[in-house]
Amino acid sequence: MDRPYRILAVNPGSTSTKIAIFEDDREVFGETIRHSVEELSAFPTIQDQLDFRRETVEKALAEHGIRLEDIDVYVGRGGGLLPLEGGVYEVTDFLAEHASRGMSGQHPAQLASQICLKFARRFGKRAFVVNPPDVDEFDDVARITGIRGIYRESHVHALNQKEVALRFCKERGLSYKDVNLVVCHLGGGISITAHRRGRMIDSNDIIKGSGPMTPTRAGDIAYMSLIELAFSGKYSKKELQDKLNKKGGLTDHFGTDDIRVVNKRMQDGDQYAALVYRALAYQIAKYIGAMAVALKGDVRAILLTGGLAKEQGLMDIVRGYVGWIAEVVLMPGEFELEALAAGALRVMRGEEEAKIYTGKPVWQPPEPHE
């Protein structure tokens, strides 16, 4: 093209829809559309929100004089798909249909591909998803547990992790497919992942629950203790799930998920806050060590990203534990919208070929011998 590609990126979250317009890799417009609990409670399921979310995107763009027909390509976060390899995927009717059914569980991210496909069909353009939450590149050995028939699954912040890895490699003149990295997305959820030559071969599970505690999640807890909690009579199934996955971690300890509040309490002399603060860093570091083992010690760098990476004191403690493994690089914040635009741009420029979603899981367990 003799002008930049105009790209609309769409990222629906639990209470917001983030959108941005890029001209090639330069963001020229961005907005976070907030949705109240009252608005969303009108919809029995996440899929029922589709037209509401699409209309809010159209309205926000129209209010800023942006015409959908002037966009060259539409790209969304993706979600609701069966396990697939990482990459950029063309949004087809089949992919959108699987997303609408929430094949991997219900999450607002599943709406993104459907919104983008509707826009693309209306204006005769293309639609993509990039490294959706369903990316699964695990080594087979990483899937096995001590219970026959229960396997570890890949639930990782794939979009931001891959983007951070690509950015680091570009800055250093490296190829992502030639190096090994440990990438740590440190936010409300934490995923710490071994990237071996372009593939995420092992990680903790941010959906079903494993890894370090987080601002909102309990992290690893001995299963006998969980059994005691489950049969204590104090919690319903949903209450216990919420305690572990939404109200755990810093929230359970301090009634807040804000690491800055915990830091302030620590600075004011609260010894318990200081202990938990150090424990969070310690648990993050232990999982970095585990992922270094998955890479057999061959680690080019440890990349720390996400909101918690802005907490310098916490990162200093982590660095003190793992700095001997490899260079520790801080890349704070999230780059999800930028990652969506970058993926679409690579395809439009012919630098990468868009994949086609088949709906065939990337791995099937072998039949054990009796």
Image (cartoon, rainbow, N blue to C red):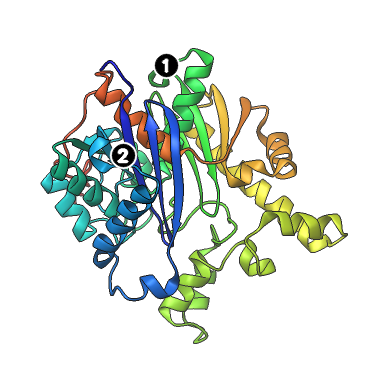
Lower sequence index among marks 2 and 1? 2
Report if residue 32 is visible in the image. yes
Q: SS at mark 1?
A: loop
**Quadrant housing residue 90:** top left
Q: CA distance from mark 2 to mark 1?
A: 24 Å
> Could you tell me which residue is drawn at 21 percent across and 45 percent down?
119
> Could you tell me which residue is drawn at 75 percent across and 43 percent down?
313
From the viewer's perspective, is 47 left or right of 303? Answer: left
From the viewer's perspective, is 41 left or right of 314? Answer: left
Residue corresponding to mark 1: 175
> Could you tell me which residue is drawn at 18 percent across and 50 percent down?
96
Q: Residues within 10 Å of mark 1 (few under 14, many from 20)?
A: some
Q: Residues within 10 Å of mark 2 (few under 14, many from 20)?
A: some
User: Residue 163: percent from the left, percent from the top?
Assistant: 44, 32
> Could you tell me which residue is drawn at 49 percent across and 64 percent down?
245
From the viewer's perspective, is 91 left or right of 330? Answer: left
Up/down of 351 relative to 343, above or below: above
State the quadrant of the N terminus: top left
User: Residue 148: percent from the left, percent from the top?
Assistant: 30, 57
Report if residue 149 is visible in the image. no
Please count the marks in the image. 2
User: Residue 231: percent from the left, percent from the top?
Assistant: 47, 82
User: Residue 21: percent from the left, percent from the top?
Assistant: 38, 37
Q: SS at mark 2?
A: helix
Residue corresponding to mark 2: 140
What is the three-letter code of the residue carrying label 2? Asp
Up/down of 205 relative to 48, above or below: above
**Nearer to us in this view, 140 or 16:** 16
| Of the two numbered discs 2 and 1 in the rendering, the one whose residue sits closer to the viewer | 1
What is the three-letter code of the residue carrying label 1? Ser
**Nearer to us in this view, 275 or 172:** 172
